Amino acid sequence: MKIKISLLVILLFSCTAASAQNWGGGVDDEKVHFGFTFQYTSSLYKVQKKSDWRNRFIDPDSKLPITDTLSALYGKSSPGFGIGFIVNGRISNNADIRLTPTLVFSDRLMEYDYVQPSRVNMPFSTVEQKVSATMVEFPLGIKIKSNRRNNFRAYMLYGAKYAMNIASKKKTNDDGQDYLYKLLKNRKSYISYEAGLGMDLYFEYFKMSPEIKFSYTPGNILDDSQPNPYNAPIDKLKLRHVTFSLFFE
């Protein structure tokens, strides 16, 4: 009796495993398929300071200092979110090429700490600069996949993305403001390198893929065309992103 029950359990498991291979709607067998994604992002500036970054900022007109001496300058982690689409092209059973155009809403934070007691008539000792960004991103990557095991497959992702800020000019317009109230600005577009890890989870009619991805800008994204107290101490400004995504295909 026990042998019959064991054989029945094995048979049921085998049938379930065999049918599970068809889960996901056969999406992996299509030459091109589509989907959508939701993302949570964390952004952080990496700052390369000038050798004289502590110096007070001098008003170009009056030639008088308008800030205190800096004691610290650093980026702060800031969250954001994004929504996007997936265009996936099948290269082989273990490789895909992916384009995931995404709209990302995020703020980037920089903090400036000044030495006290004040040597000039400066109304604050700490300044937090917030750069509001609405980015259209075009990540293009190669997805390297393991062999499928029932309803699971692991993968790695390597690639690059082009990003462009489409935020309204009202968020970055500081014309007519005193130097102390000017804004830190970034270039409108940049390129980042990316690498990530994820897993494909197959359900009856679709595939869901949780993924974590790291990206960084190799170039300088600082817009220092108009010097002010907040871009003057910075030699180069780079951006780091950690993105957690859920893909549905």
Image (cartoon, rainbow, N blue to C red):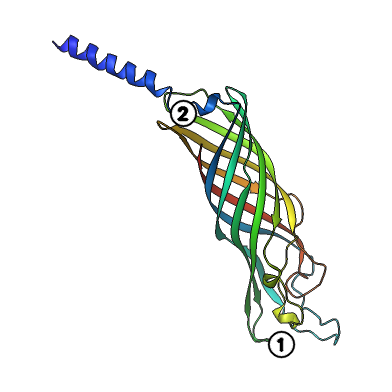
Q: Residue furthest left?
A: 1
- Residue occupied by mark 2: 25
Mark linked to residue 210? none
Q: Which residue is found at the position 44% from the left and 23% from the top? A: 149
Q: Which of the 4 image quarters holds residue 87? A: top right
Residue type of the residue flagged with mark 1:
Arg
- Residue occupied by mark 1: 119
Q: Which residue is found at the position 83% from the left and 67% from the top? A: 225
The vertical placement of 36 against 182, above or below, is: above
- Asked whether 102 or 131 is in front, the reply is 102
- Asked whether 44 or 8 is in front, the reply is 8
Counting from the top left corner in percent of width and height, residue 188 is at 74, 59
Counting from the top left corner in percent of width and height, residue 213 is at 58, 44
Q: Which residue is found at the position 73% from the left and 67% from the top? A: 185
- Asked whether 180 or 147 is in front, the reply is 147
* SS state under label 2: loop
The vertical placement of 231 against 46, above or below, is: below
Q: Which residue is found at the position 72% from the left and 88% from the top? A: 120
Q: Which of the 4 image quarters holds residue 184? A: bottom right
Mark-to-mark CA distance, 2 and 1: 69 Å
Residue 42 visible, this orientation: yes
Quarter that holds the N terminus = top left
| Discs 2/1, front | 2
* SS state under label 1: loop
* 191 relative to 14 in the view: left or right: right
* 25 relative to 229 in the view: left or right: left
Residue type of the residue flagged with mark 2:
Gly
